[in-house]
Amino acid sequence: MGIWDVKKDNEREQWVFVPQVGVGPLRFGMAPDEVSAALGSNAPVSRLVQRSSGNYELVEAQFTELGVTAYYGTRQALACVAVDVLAGPQVMLDGVFLVARVPSEAEDWLCKHTEVHELDLIYTHAADPGSADLGLILRAQRAGDIVLTRPLFLIREWAENSWDCIPGEEWSRF
């Protein structure tokens, strides 16, 4: 695969998103070692550690080969999972693929889905659509000359306060 090649849906692992519970083999609240174990033998390629109240805490682990980034909140509990457009698993919610979609089409689907199910619809500071009720934000990521959806699956508290909770490194990814 080239640097901008996007895996086809049938070449990706297939995951299911269960709102407020988890995505694929990952469950919100997992510790970093549990996340690594759930993802198999794939150790994170990089980790971001920040100092908090005199202690160093893991806030991010990138599993580049799988196309997954795990973000940790207080007590190093899994609070958010970002799926890479190029190499990440395909994730479904109610039979709809969420990864590597045209952003406007994904936004239209989300607007209809939240209306039909009487869920909230929010927009981040970066104009990314989402729903705190679902724990989903549909970000965009560059894939060569186009942009496609890079979904974030997250706990309600982070969805409601995405600017404050999600590490700045995620917002700078495009």
Image (cartoon, rainbow, N blue to C red):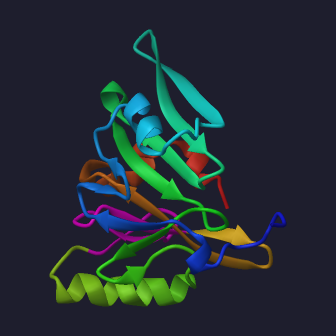
Image position, residue 139 (x, y; %): 52, 67
In the displayed structure image, the side of residue 159 where residue 115 appears, left or right: left
Q: Quadrant of residue 47?
A: top right
Q: Position of residue 87 (x, y in %)?
A: 64, 63
User: Which residue occupies the foreground of this view, 87 or 137?
Assistant: 87
Q: Residue furthest right?
A: 2
Provide residue 144's location: percent of width, then percent of height.
79, 74
The residue range painted magenta reads 121-139
Q: How many marks?
A: 0
**Residue 69 located left or right of residue 160:** right
Identify the residue at image location x=59%, y=42%.
62
Residue 156 vertical position relative to residue 42 in the rendered view, above or below: below
Q: Residue at x 29, y 80 (%)?
A: 94
In the rendered image, the vertical position of residue 98 relative to residue 67, given as above or below? below
Q: Residue furthest left?
A: 118
- Residue 134: say if magenta: yes
Which residue is rendered at x = 49% and y = 90% of the image? Answer: 105
Q: Which residue is at 35% across, 67% downward?
A: 16
In the picture, which quadrant includes the C terminus? bottom right
- Residue 37: x and y in percent read 43, 37
Q: Does 14 lie within the magenta span?
A: no
Is 134 or 161 nearer to us in this picture?
134
Give the quarter of the figure containing the N terminus. Answer: bottom right
> In the current view of this chain or complex, which residue is farthest to the top?
54
